[in-house]
Image (cartoon, rainbow, N blue to C red):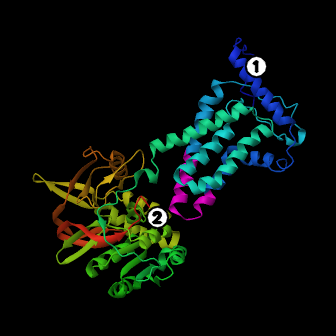
Amino acid sequence: MSPDVDLTLPKPGPHPLRSRLLALDGRLFEFAAERNWPAAEPVLPRLSRSANHGVLWFAAAAAMAASRTPRARRAAARGLASLSLASLTINTLGKRSVRRPRPVLDPVPLVRQLKRQPITTSFPSGHSASAAAFAAGVALESPAWGAVVAPVAWSVALSRVYTGVHFPSDVLAGAALGVGAAFAVRGMVPTRAQIVPPARPRADVPALPDGAGLIVVANTASGTADRVRALQDGLPGAEVLTCEPADVRAELEKAAARAQVLGVCGGDGTVNAAAEIALRHDVPLAVLPGGTLNHFAYDLGVEGARDLTRAIQQGEGVKVDVGRFACDGKQGVFLNACSLGVYPELVLERDRWSKRIGGWPAGVLAALRVLRADRHPLEAEFRGQTRPLWLLFVGNGTYHRMGLTPGRRLDLADGQFDVRVVHGGRRPALRLLAAAVAGPLTRSPAHAAVQVNRLHLTGVEPGTLLAYDGEVTEVDSEVTLEKLPEALTVYRPMPSS
C-alpha cells in the first residue's frame, strides 16, 4: 500500500492568508507537542487506536441498544447513520480534495506516537469526523445519551493532535463535517421530537400523584419486569398484577371492574385486549409499552415508564379513535390496523417460529416463506372482473411519512381509515416493497390508497384470515369496518410538560 499524497505534484503558489493560517496551525501543533500531558499518556493513544474503523462507536452503539429503551436504540441507529455519512464524505471527497501531508513527528515524544502511522492525507481528520458525527447524531435523538458520548468523542478528536497524526485545523474541519453529517441525516430522517403527535382532543382524566387507583396488568411473556418496576418506583400506590398470556384477559376484566384507571403493559395484542375492556367499562386506559413494536404507545407519544408516570401524576390525557370490525356476529376492535391477505399469514407463520428462534428472526423467516408461496390470498371484483390482491391494509388513522422514515400516525383522532391495497401479480415481494416506498402516493402500478371512515367488504371467501393489532381471526362472507370517533380515553404526556 502506498500513501495517497503525491509528493511529485507541484506545490500551490504563494497565498499570504493561507500561508499565515498554515503557519499558525503549525505553531499550535508544536505548542501541543511540547506540553507535558501526564494524565493523557496512558489513555489518549489507546483511545485513538480504539476508534480505528469506527470500532469504538460500533461498540458504544451496541451498549446503548442493549439498554432496551426505544430512545437509546434510535439514538444508536442515528449515530451510526451519521458516522457512515461522514466517513463516506471524508473518503470520497475530503481526503482527495485537499492533499495535505501529515505533520512531521519530530516534536512529538516517542511515547505518544502511534505504532502504526496512518498513510492517508491529513486534511480533514476522519477520526474526528466520525467521533463528532456519532456524538451529534446521538445527541439529536437523545440529549442524555449525547452527554455521555460527547466527552469520549472530544477525547478521540484531541488524541489525534496529541499523538501527532493531525494538525489542529484537520481536527476542527473533521469535527465540523461530522456535525454537518448528523444534521444532514436529521434532514432525511426526522427525530422523534420533530414529529410529536398533536395532544388533541384533550380529555378529563384523574390525576393520581402516587398512582393510587391505578391497576396495571402486565403480560409476563413480553419481558415487562424492568418497565413495571420503573413504573412502580414513580407510582408506589399503583397495584400491579403480572400474569401469563392465557390469563391476561380475565385479569383485565377483574381489574377494570374495580379500578379508577386501567393500566396495561405488554405488546400490541395485549393493549388491544385492554382497550376493548376499557371501552366496555368506560374507564381511562394507561398504556406502558412492553412488547416488540408498541405501535400504539409510540404513536401516542408514550415511550416508557417516565412518560406514563408524568401523565398519570399530572392528569394528562386525550381521546383517540378506535376501529371496529364485524362479521356474521363476530366483532373486535383495533387501535393500529387490520389487514387481509399476506400479512395475516405472515403473523401466523411468525408466531409459529417465534418461541424457537425469537421475534425478529421469526418475522424474517415468515416473510420469506409466505412470499415464496406465490399464492394470492385475496380476490376483489371490479367492473365485473375478478382481480387478485396481495394485501388489503386498513390503518386506524392516516399514516404519514417524513423524510425516509417508515409511515407513522401523527393524529390518532382524525376520523379516517387509511386504506391501502397492493394489487396481485408476479413477484409479491417487489410489489409490497414498491407500495411501501410509494408511501403517500395515492396510486401506483403496485398499489392504491384512499381515506374513508367506513368500509364494507363482500364476497369474502370462508376461512379468510384477518389480522388486527397482531391477533388473527377467520372471517367470511361480509366484513364491515367502522370508526368509533374519540371513543377511548388514554393517558399521554402533554408536549409542554
In this rendering, is residue 264 above or below 127?
below
The spot of residue 82 in percent (x, y) is: 56, 44
Q: Mark 2 highlights which residue?
A: 303
Query: Quadrant of residue 180 in the image?
Result: top right
The reply to whether residue 55 is in sight is: no
Quarter of the picture holding the N terminus = top right
Is 133 in the magenta? no
Residues 29 and 185: in front is: 29
Callout 1 secondary element: loop
The reply to whether residue 170 is in sight is: yes
Dot in front, 1 or 2: 2
Q: Mark 1 highlights which residue?
A: 7
Q: Is residue 450 left or right of residue 399?
A: left
The spot of residue 91 in percent (x, y) is: 63, 33
The type of residue carrying mark 2 is Glu
Tell me whether the residue at label 1 lies in contact with that at label 2, contact meaning CB atoms closer than 8 angstroms. no
Please name the residue shown 69% across and 17% down the image. Answer: 17
The spot of residue 2 in percent (x, y) is: 75, 28
